[in-house]
Image (cartoon, coloured by chain):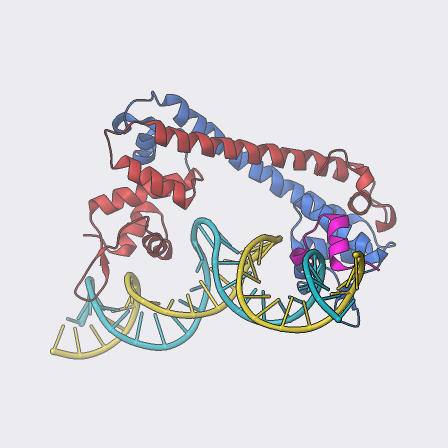
Chain colours: A blue, B red, C yellow, D cyan
Amino acid sequence: MYSIGDLSRLTGVKVPTIRYYEQVGLISAAQRSEGNQRRYEKNDLERLAFIRHARDLGFDVPAIRDLIALSHHPDAPCAGADRIAEDHLAAVREKIAKLRKLERELERIVSHCSGHSVEDCYVIRALSEHGLCEAEH
Amino acid sequence: MYSIGDLSRLTGVKVPTIRYYEQVGLISAAQRSEGNQRRYEKNDLERLAFIRHARDLGFDVPAIRDLIALSHHPDAPCAGADRIAEDHLAAVREKIAKLRKLERELERIVSHCSGHSVEDCYVIRALSEHGLCEAEH
DNA sequence: GCTAATCCCTCTAGCCACTATAGGTTCAAG
DNA sequence: CTTGAACCTATAGTGGCTAGAGGGATTAGC
């Protein structure tokens, strides 16, 4: 039997976050001690570690809910889980692409600034005059 | 004199967003018509375009406030604006680095999945057993 | 001058995944 | 038995908007 604090230390998930996961239904309501404190068992620990892991990989709460549901049906085809992971991967790649565009534009702006007064600062000018931009955004 | 809708069309910033910018102090409270509707002039238009542009580049509201303040002192040294842009560029690069790690890990998980039943699905297994991970996360 | 359509106003609540705070209760060690 | 840490619930806040309700203003056409 673990207290919520034990679970927190063992998984690296903060105590309020564990309660939050219970609230949004990622973990089921824990058993309680006589004094109404949460008491967990090993399978709760595993489930929380699973969630933590999925969150670290950037899956959102609905996706994790789906992954948990799938993991409870070991005989079901794997395509569902695969699909979720692939969709997420695609989203991550899109974010990277957008950030890279931003990076290039910012590099250009910063590198053009010759470092005198604000009057001819390229950073400020680039923001004021859209014509100085390389790409659409 | 522009109405808030005119300003919205001209800058591509949605009407509620313009009001939000006023609320958080990015633009000063506009003049009002007799019937209490906002009326803008050309310099308001320029300022909003500046803000839009900075948002597109991912600057957050406090950074934009600082950039606007700087842009009002044309004789001040440019270092402040430069600094803001460089800090932001660094933050963007960090985000990219994190997302790339994620991308690699997800690629590895997805590609290992041979596509049978959930029981031996690599996606689910990778989430359950941290030992299957390549990197720390 | 009237009417209808469109625009505009304020205020409040919702999004996501937490995090923080307040005010109170329980537990475990000494 | 006392103390202090850990626990409980409930509510509000984070950022940068967005959506909706319930009204008032403006404007184009007749």
* Badge count: 0
Q: Is residue A10 magenta?
A: yes
Residue drawn at x 35%, y 43% is: B65
Closer to the camera, A80 or D9?
D9
Main SS class of the magenta portion in the image: helix
Closer to the camera, A17 or B39?
A17
Q: What residue occupies the far top of the structure in this picture?
A: A114
Q: Let me know if residue A83 appears in the view.
A: no
Task: Give the x, y percent position of residue B80.
Answer: 35, 31
Residue drawn at x 65%, y 58% is: A16
Task: Give the x, y percent position of residue A124.
Answer: 32, 32
User: What span is in magenta?
Assistant: A1-18
Q: Does the magenta stretch include residue A129?
A: no
Closer to the camera, A85 or B116?
A85
Q: Let me know if residue B107 appears in the view.
A: yes
Task: Give the x, y percent position of residue A132.
Answer: 33, 29
- Image height of D24 relative to B96, above or below: below
Looking at the rendered image, the quarter that the C terminus of chain B falls into is top right
Task: Give the x, y percent position of residue D15.
Answer: 46, 49
**Is A27 on the left or on the right of A111, as rendered?**
right
Residue drawn at x 33%, y 53% is: B18
Q: Quadrant of residue B76?
A: top left
